[in-house]
Amino acid sequence: PDLYLNELQEQLAQQHIVVASTSTIWDALGELGLTRKKLSKAAAEHNYEQCSRFKFLIGSESPEHLVFIDESHIDVQTSYQLNGWA
């Protein structure tokens, strides 16, 4: 899973009662030999079973009866933080 430094910082505080700055976490990840990578966001609400069921049900409908609504949006956090650790 991908985590931003601030998300890792929050998890350390909540789950392990460890208080660490993001720069300390950055240094520790580097010392562990982890490397940075480009991040890409998958659909947060993607449900493969539900998607398959929808495709099966919609397959018999006439295209003239279908209306498509776009729910896409800009993820502000992702647009600023394009790198993570791997």
Image: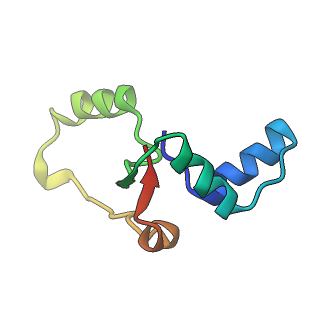
Q: Which residue is drawn at 83% across and 52% down?
A: 19
Location of residue 50 (image quadrant): top left
Specify the farthest residue to the left.
Answer: 63
Q: Residue at x 32, y 62 (%)?
A: 69
Given residues 52 and 62, the one toward you in this image is 52
Q: In this view, does 21 lie to the left or right of 52?
A: right
In this rendering, the answer to whether 3 lies above or below 15 is below
Specify the farthest residue to the front.
Answer: 31
Residue 10, percent from left and from top: 74, 52
Residue 17, percent from left and from top: 87, 42
Q: In this view, does 58 lie to the left or right of 70?
A: left
Location of residue 4 (image quadrant): bottom right
Task: Tally the marks.
Answer: 0
Q: Which residue is drawn at 45% across and 54% down?
A: 84
Which image quarter is the C terminus in? Answer: top left
Residue 62, percent from left and from top: 12, 44
Given residues 60 and 84, the one toward you in this image is 84
Task: Tell me which colouring the rendered structure shows.
Answer: rainbow
Residue 64, percent from left and from top: 12, 54
Q: Which residue is drawn at 21% across and 53% down?
A: 66
Q: Is residue 2 left or right of residue 24?
A: left
Q: Is residue 5 left or right of residue 82?
A: right
